[in-house]
Amino acid sequence: MFSIGTPEMIVIAVIAIFIVGPKRLPEILRGVAYIYKNIKKAIDELQRELNEDLETIDEINPKKQIEKKWEEFLKDEDEKKEEDQKRPQ
């Protein structure tokens, strides 16, 4: 996202004091913090759900399934060859 440093926070605080006044500033800051917390919570939840959906899509991806089966087949074939080589003739 973006970052706000100490100088920017001081400027914002001074402007906020001039606009809303020192009496209402704590109330407004609590409201802003509450909204920020809820938006962050919603974004985190959405990101978690999207990651879960992407994992599900990745699991049912036909290309990946075929690659996985092919690797299993090759592994089985290699094991059979090794067993055949170990058997006395």
Image (cartoon, rainbow, N blue to C red):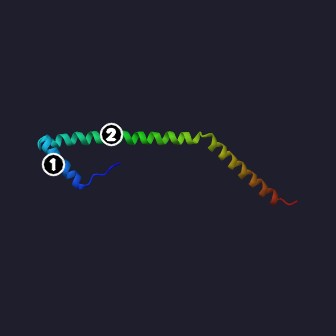
Q: Left or right: 42 with respect to 64? A: left
Mark 1 belongs to which amino acid?
Val
* Identity of the residue drawn at 38% across and 41% down: 43
* Identity of the residue drawn at 63% across and 42% down: 63
Q: Nearer the viewer, residue 89 or 61?
A: 61
Local crowd at mark 2 within 10 Å, few (<14), some, or many (≥20)?
few
Per the rendering, the mark at residue 54 is: none
Q: Secondary structure at mark 1?
A: helix
* Identity of the residue drawn at 14% across and 40% down: 20
Mark before the other along the chain sequence, 1 or 2:
1
Q: Could you tell me if the residues under marks 1 and 2 are in contact, i.e. CB atoms within 8 Å?
A: no
Say which residue label 2 marks.
39
Say which residue label 1 marks.
14
Mark 2 belongs to which amino acid?
Ile
Residue found at the far right of this picture: 89
Q: Position of residue 28 (x, y in %)?
A: 19, 40
Q: Quadrant of residue 44?
A: top left
Total numbered circles: 2
Foreground label between 1 and 2: 1
Local crowd at mark 1 within 10 Å, few (<14), some, or many (≥20)?
few
Q: From the viewer's perspective, is residue 8 above or below residue 25?
A: below
